[in-house]
Amino acid sequence: MNRHRFRALFRSTGPVVLPVIHVRDGVQAERNVATALDCGAPGVFLINHDFLRTELVPILRDVRARFADAWIGVNFLATTGFDAFPSLGDLAREGVRLDGYWADDARIDERRPADDQRDAAAIADVRRRSEWSGLYFGGTCFKKQREVAPEHHATAATTAVDFMDVVCTSGLATGRAADLDKISTFRAAIGDAPLAVASGITPDNAHGYVRDVDCFMVATGIDRPGDFYEIDPDRLTRLLAITRASEIPT
């Protein structure tokens, strides 16, 4: 997977905008998926921010049934691929297609050699055995996980490429923009692999990221002010307009 092919999957020349919906219940989830798609977003991520992973599963079934053709991804909060991939495989065998899985922690360890990534390699094996066929967005040097010193970001990013489809990083916390130097370091380290950012992107700062980033996974930057759970159509439309006017630099 390279960044050109990734963008082509979503028919996008600029960064792919995937709104992240913090799910409260099925009605709220479906309402926000509809809003995102009506605005022209090419897909969405759903995340169980306030309840257990097992409680999100029936909501995923219902959302998929209503939006049969939409690109739908999931983040099972505080869950690594060890547990997520078997669940995704089980859902796929039920006929519930989920197109992407985003892990906050892909278990990349920059302190170990690239050929001795025990956890990441074990997760890759679990993924293969699950027979789930979607895109894996792997959190690397990600918020609220084990802190990685900036001087080791390049090593972590380079190592990550072999274990996921899309390398995903973030700022220091939810709603905090990633440092532009960090993004530049990641881009240089991963070469032509796709890069996603999952915090702090807004219509006001997106211009600073469009050159190096291929996917904006965004929640607070497009939510209604003061509301963690509802997409603001105007803010999302503004962000989509910015990304449609950009493309990978030659």
Image (cartoon, grey):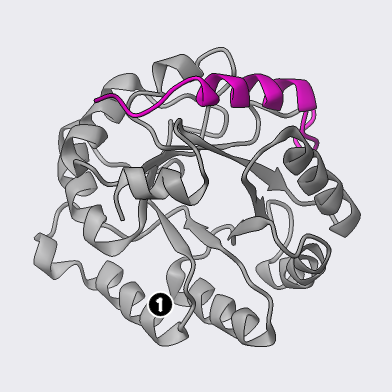
The residue at 73%/53% (across/down) is 50
- In this image, 177 relative to 154: left or right? right
Would you say residue 242 sits in the magenta stretch? yes
Q: Report the number of discs.
A: 1
- Toward the top, the furthest residue is 204
Q: Where does label 1 land, which residue?
A: 127
- Toward the right, the furthest residue is 27
- In this image, 16 relative to 35: left or right? left
The residue at 25%/54% (across/down) is 160
- 165 or 84, which lies in front? 165
Element type where label 1 sits in the image: helix
The residue at 70%/65% (across/down) is 52
- 210 or 143, which lies in front? 210
Image position, residue 57 (x, y; %): 72, 71
- In this image, 186 relative to 54: left or right? left
Image position, residue 155 (x, y; %): 15, 45
- 57 or 239, which lies in front? 239
Image position, residue 214 (x, y; %): 40, 37
Q: Amino acid at mark 1?
A: Arg
Within 10 Å of disc 1 (Cα), the crowding (few <14, some 14-19, many 20+) is many
- In this image, 97 relative to 216: left or right? right
State whether residue 108 is above or below residue 60: above
Quarter placement of the N terminus: bottom left
- 45 or 11, which lies in front? 11
> Could you tell me if residue 42 is visible in this image?
yes
State whether residue 139 is above or below residue 59: above
Quarter placement of the C terminus: top left
The residue at 23%/45% (across/down) is 157
> Could you tell me if residue 145 is visible in this image?
no
- The stretch of residues the image draws in magenta is 226-250
Would you say residue 67 sits in the magenta stretch? no
Using the rendered view, name the quadrant where residue 56 is placed. Answer: bottom right
